[in-house]
Image (cartoon, rainbow, N blue to C red):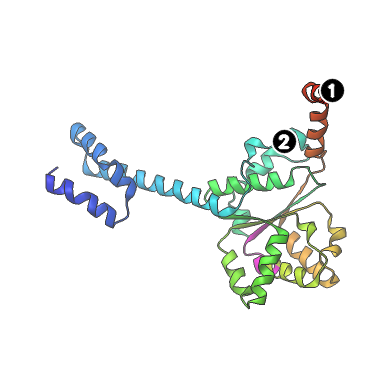
Amino acid sequence: MSDANTATLPVLLSALRLPSIARHWTRHAETADREGWPAARLLATLFELEVADRTARRIQRHHEQSALPAGKTFATFDFDAAPGLSKGRLQALAAGDLWLKNGSNVLAFGPSGTGKSHAAAALGSALIDAGYRVLFTRTTDMVQRLQAARRDLNLESMLDKLDKFDLVILDDFSYVRKDQAETSVLFELIAHRYERHSLLITANQPFSTWDQVFPDPAMCVAAIDRLVHHAVILEMNGESYRKRTAVERAASPLTQEAAVTK
């Protein structure tokens, strides 16, 4: 390759925003010259590198934008402590595919401490790795954001912006206060995404108590109807992980020894 081409290529690659090719082209070009690669093979190799690096950067960016809690993955989830939750079922959901395309929902129910939030975050993380967009938020935080948008007359705009996420995870759904202003914006979100984009909800209370979330009976029925129409329901009724961990910690020899020496 001529010195002129060698000098010009980095400028062209920078202008075309091809940083991965800019980093690797000299090494692969030397290999191609030495081994007699056809031009098509060299080009394919370089563009494959660029595509792979762009995909990795996009996934990393989507993880950062998701607000998912750190370290909550399938690898760190104790499936033995959640006997009612099928690992295979969760991993099937992690493939995304039709349920996200159809705007179906996932509803995870169970007492506090049974791993609902961890399972939801793990599913969200796996979906991002598979190329989807996910947002994780406490339901109370989402309600505050929606209320602020309504006050600023930007509610519709905010709901439209949330459409860029294939899945919005609303954690601790049952903790929303019984307030008409709060629950009405929550219903707006549910109605807006219905059959268009998916929601994943974690809740420690069954549907029968959701009148505490939606004080208006008609709104309560309409919200539940939209959520369950196309939904996968996960029942997580095991022992509280936090309680079990505290008991195990209290029973450990090291903990008992520390208590004696105090």
Quadrant containing the N terminus in the rendered view: top left
What type is the residue that disc 2 sits on?
Answer: Phe
How many neighbours does mark 2 have within 10 angstroms: few (below 14), some (14-19), or many (20 or more)? some
Q: Position of residue 219 (x, y in %)?
A: 80, 71
Would you identify the image quadrant in which residue 119 lies? top right
Q: Residue at x 52, y 52 (%)?
A: 62
**26 inside magenta stretch:** no
Q: Which residue is nearer to you in this view: 227 or 181?
A: 181
Q: Can I make out residue 104 in this image?
A: no
Q: Which mark is residue 260?
A: 1
Q: CA distance from mark 2 to mark 1?
A: 35 Å
Across and down, in percent, residue 243 comes to 82, 37
Q: Residue 83's spot in the image, x, y percent? A: 78, 36
Res. 255 image quadrant: top right
Q: Is residue 209 above or below residue 92?
A: below
Which kind of residue does numbered mark 1 sit on?
A: Val
User: Any mark on residue 104, and which?
Assistant: none
- What element does badge 2 sit on? helix
Q: Mark yes or no: residue 208 visible.
A: yes
Image quadrant where one finds the C terminus: top right
Q: Point out the stretch of residues depicted in magenta.
A: 191-199
